[in-house]
Structure formats: C-alpha cells, structure tokens
C-alpha cells in the first residue's frame, strides 16, 4: 500500500504526449494517401481498396518487415530524426520490389522510453516522405512508451509493408540465365546496415560527429545520416518500360551481408556471377571507414554496400535500355558484371578473391568479386 496514488503518467506513460505526437504527424501521413486509402489516422486498422488488382490473373501478395539497426544511435547523438524514417522505408519497401511487386501500403512501429512529440513526429514525417517517394501509402502505425525498459532518450523503429505482383511477372532466380549482365545502381552512402561496425570504428578513433571532413563536403555526422536511397519507383519504371521490362530477370537489394551475399540469393544453382570492382568507385566514406579502423577489405565488403545499393540481372540485349531508363529517372547505374555457368566461374586468385554462395540459407549460385575499385584508398592515413 502507498499513501500516494499511482497514475499512468506517474508510471512513465503520457498518453497526452502521444496524442500530441499524432496531431503533429497527421498532415505528413495524410499526404501519402491516394483515393485507394479508406479512413485516416486514429482507426484501429488501415484500410486500402485493392479493387485495382481485380484484373490480375493471379495476384501474389509480397510482404516485408525491417528496421534501421544501430544507425539510430547516430541520429540520437545528432538530434536529427527525420532521416531515420526515410531509412526505414527504403529498408522495407525495396525488399518487396525485388520480386517485382508494387508496394501498396506500409505501417510503422516506434518504441521509446519517453514520448517526445516533436521527435516522434519527425520520425513519422520522414517515413511519410519516404512513402511518397516510393509511391506507397502509410496507412497505420503505433507508438509505444516503455518506461523502465528503455531509457527516456531511447527509441527503436520498425516497419512492415505489403505489395502485389502478377504471378507470371514475378522476378527471381528461375529467370536468370548465363549470358545475363549484372547492373549496379548507385547507393547514397552507407544506407542503414553495418552501423555496429561503423560505430566501433568511430569509437576507437574517438571521432567527433561535428568534425567537417573535406572528402565528404560536410560533417561526419551529416554523412553518416544520409538517408537510404529508395529504389522502388525507379525499379518499377524499369520493369514496366517496354524497352527493358521483358529483359529484367532478377533484382537484389544490397543490405546486410554486402553485395556478394545478397546477389547470390537471386542466382539459380549451376550459375555464377563475376563482378568487377573496377566498374565503379565507392564514395569516400567507405574508404574512410576502412582506413580509420584498419578494416580488412573483405570484411568491409561483407558488411557494407560499397556504393551499390540495388542490383538488376538483365538480358544482355536490354542492358543499355535499362541503364538509360534508370538515368532518365535520375538514378545512375552501370554494368558491373556478368552471369556465367558455374563451371566457367574462375577459381579465386589472390587475397581479395573468394566465391560467396549459400547466403541467407539459399542454396543457389556463387558470386566472385575480382579486380579493384579505381582510386580505392582504404588503407591511406587519416
């Protein structure tokens, strides 16, 4: 027994602050709605009219869920939170588009130690902006206050999305053939994976996020918070473009595990991919992380995207059209490799070559990275 009454607010949960956060985010969320969205903020469930898919012969629903990992620690230290929302959209929606699915709707979940309405609204505003870019409605979400479990300044975010693809147009390993080429689409930077490695490097170096880095043209913190590039709309245009669409066989979103491991997930058994590092130059941030932490290149490549955030495996005769179409939509891309019969994949030679296969439990083809990036300075002095 206690002489003082215990209230929900006294226990650490402020529902009024939660309502204030909703009021602040309402306009941004509503901006993602098209005529297919029914209802609005405050409903128990988000509703989407899917009558548009009635003409599909065999519609397949695609779903994905993800978070943004420990990049949140950088956002907290910088007190910048909207970019995290865009990261979340990229990590979730771009997994769906890999099978050729058009995103329909997304929901988010934010857990925090204490609801700070302005911070929650910033996060959700970023999610809404990312959804607009991906042409996907943000139809629901939840903010949960967890006092005693999380410190007041702590928070974590997660999201889930659903999309649809016609079964006959689904992309994947079964379409990939020897002779196809590998197109790499530029990343915007580190994106949202590998930040445990990045933060360990920064901690060992005792880095100041406010330090201006000439290579970046901005502060270290600003570089690290660069939002994940959202590829969905670009990729869907490429798939729907009559000049290139029929030649797009598979896609791979380059997230945790790096380029080789994620590309291996969309290769059929009996094939291999030979990828030439000399075809692209990673942004300076990758070399800086390698240098500051003396991170071995293979470890770096197995963790970060190294400048390529999405891959398309396409028929050789449509590669030029695919790259041109991506350029027209504002996305730089280039041929970085080729698909070969597994027996034709060269044996690794030298310390930087190895064949990566069996990633994420997928028993498919193998990927060999060869050569070296132009201007790579991962071992230079800081």
Image (cartoon, rainbow, N blue to C red):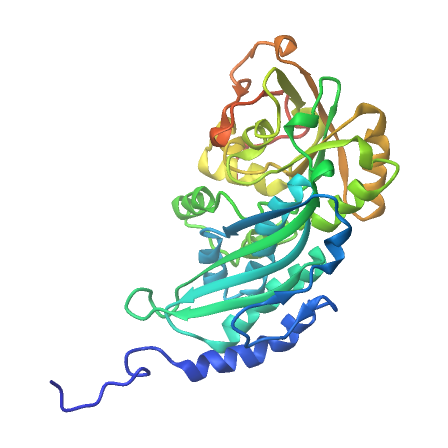
Q: How many marks?
A: 0
Place residue 341 in its image quadrant.
top right
Q: Image quarter for residue 89?
A: bottom right
Q: Is residue 296 visible?
A: no
Q: Position of residue 82 (x, y in %)?
A: 58, 65
Q: Is residue 373 left or right of residue 200?
A: right
Asked whether residue 112 is in view, the answer is yes
Q: In x, y percent, where is residue 167?
A: 69, 39
Taking 138 as reference, is 316 above or below it? above
Q: Give coordinates of residue 146: x percent, y percent.
A: 34, 68
The picture quadrant where one finds residue 145 is bottom left
- Please provide percent x and percent y for residue 140: 56, 67
Eyeballing the image, is 248 above or below 326?
Answer: above
Question: Relative to residue 57, is residue 351 depicted above or below?
Answer: above
Residue under the point 57% across and 79% down: 24
Q: Does residue 299 appear to the left or right of 12 in the view shown? A: right
């Amino acid at each position: 027994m206690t002489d003082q009454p215990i209230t929900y607010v006294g226990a650490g949960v402020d529902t009024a602050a939660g309502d204030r956060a909703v009021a602040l985010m309402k306009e941004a969320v509503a901006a993602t709605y098209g005529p297919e969205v029914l209802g609005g903020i405050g409903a128990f469930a988000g509703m989407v009219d899917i009558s548009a898919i009635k003409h599909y012969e065999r519609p397949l629903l695609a779903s994905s869920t993800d978070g943004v990992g420990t990049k949140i620690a950088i956002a907290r230290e910088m007190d910048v939170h909207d970019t995290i929302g865009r990261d979340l959209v990229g990590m979730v929606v771009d997994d769906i588009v890999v099978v050729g699915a058009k995103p329909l709707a997304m929901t988010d979940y934010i857990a925090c130690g204490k609801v700070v309405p302005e911070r929650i609204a910033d996060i959700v505003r970023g999610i809404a902006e990312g959804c607009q870019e991906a042409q996907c409605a943000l139809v629901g979400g939840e903010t949960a206050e967890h006092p005693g479990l999380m410190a007041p300044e702590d928070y974590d975010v997660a999201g889930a999305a659903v999309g649809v693809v016609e079964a006959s147009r689904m992309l994947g390993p079964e379409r990939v053939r020897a002779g196809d080429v590998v197109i790499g689409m530029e990343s915007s930077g580190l994106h949202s994976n590998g930040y445990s490695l990045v933060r360990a490097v920064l901690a060992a170096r005792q880095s100041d996020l406010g330090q201006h880095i000439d290579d970046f043209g901005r502060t270290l913190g600003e570089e690290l918070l660069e939002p994940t590039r959202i590829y969905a709309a670009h990729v869907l245009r490429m798939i729907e473009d009559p000049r290139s669409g029929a030649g797009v066989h598979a896609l791979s979103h380059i997230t945790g595990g790096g380029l080789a491991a994620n590309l291996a997930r969309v290769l059929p058994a009996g094939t291999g991919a030979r990828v030439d590092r000399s075809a692209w130059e990673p942004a300076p941030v990758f070399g800086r992380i390698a240098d500051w932490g003396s991170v071995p290149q293979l470890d770096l490549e197995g963790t970060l995207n190294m400048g390529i955030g999405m891959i398309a495996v396409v028929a050789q005769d449509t590669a030029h059209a695919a790259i041109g179409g991506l350029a027209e939509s504002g996305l730089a891309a280039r041929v970085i490799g080729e698909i070969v019969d597994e027996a034709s994949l060269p044996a690794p030679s030298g310390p930087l070559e190895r064949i990566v296969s069996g990633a994420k439990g997928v028993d498919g083809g193998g990927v060999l990275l060869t050569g070296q990036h132009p201007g790579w300075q991962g071992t230079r002095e800081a």
